[in-house]
Amino acid sequence: MKRLLYAIIATALFIQGCGKDNYDEPQSEITGRVTFNGVPLNVKGTGEAVQLKLFQPGFQLNGEVPVYVGQDGTFKIKIFDGQYKLVGRDNNGPWVNATDTLDINLNGNTEVNYEVNPYFLIENTKLSISGDNKLSGSFSIVKNVATANMSFYTVLVSKTAFVDDVSNFYRKDYDTATGSVINVSEDLSNNETAKSATALFARVGVRATAADQAIYSEVIKIR
């Protein structure tokens, strides 16, 4: 509802700029994914941390609609038909500053991909937990931008399917990574939440020094 309210308010500003006083609730939807080479990227999904922005050409001064990206790289916004431009928010996200503009001619529902260039990629993630609450796993960190430097990588565990640097009960950061495959082993045997939770979810992330957000693996249910 919060996202829809933002869209309605911003769209109302657009329409006021066109001289219209009365309007119906928007019925069309833009759905999409933030992708690299067509593959969705996993990001922080809580706190509206990763955003794109949508605006109508000629009406930028009347406001822009924030488009919030979910942890699986998807987004959705309900808005009026019309000509729009979708662009990344300045210096936001685990990718090279996204300045490319995607033109959208909205007439009914439409699906789009917004392509970005991430500093790092995480591949081949495997995570599991044993009966005595020992977490183990492996994954690869791939440098996708030649000049990128890693700030840290992190292992996260949550009792919900939302897992990131805020939504977790266990977090372990590492400032160096060596080898093509990184192996992790975390002892959660004394963690009361790990012992009592009926369901557990985990993922790993890596943050570039030039980025304000980490890129993540997919969320894996480990219990």
Image (cartoon, rainbow, N blue to C red):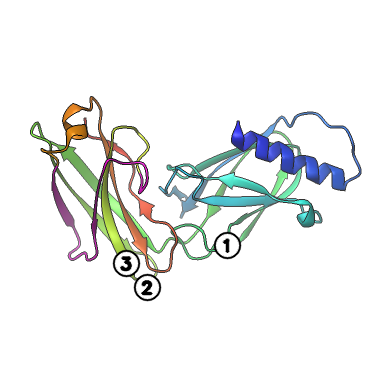
Estimate the x, y position of residue 160 in percent, counting from the top left: 33, 32
Extreme-left residue of the structure: 132
Total labels: the figure holds 3
Callout 1: 10 Å neighbours few (<14), some, many (20+)? few
The percent position of residue 87, horizontal first and vertical second, equals 62, 56
Q: Is residue 200 magenta?
A: no
| Res 106 visible | no
> How far apart are the alpha carbons under marks 3 and 1?
20 Å
User: Which residue carries the number 3 mark?
Assistant: 150
Of the image marks 3 and 1, the number of the one nearer the N terminus? 1
Left or right for 200, reference 212: left
Crowd class of label 2 (few under 14; some 14 to 19; many from 20; radius 10 Å): few
**Residue placed under numbered mark 2 in the picture:** 146
Disc 1: which residue = 90
Where is residue 159? Give x, y as percent. 29, 33
Q: Is residue 223 left or right of residue 93?
A: left
Front in this rendered view, residue 141 or 132:
132
For mark 1, give the secondary structure.
loop
Disc 3, disc 1: CB below 8 Å? no
Q: Is residue 99 above or below residue 47?
A: below
Q: Quadrant of the C terminus?
A: top left
Report which quarter residue 25 is drawn in.
Answer: top right
Separation of marks 2 and 3 at Cα, in angstroms = 11 Å
Q: Secondary structure at mark 3?
A: strand
The residue stretch that appears in magenta: 164-187
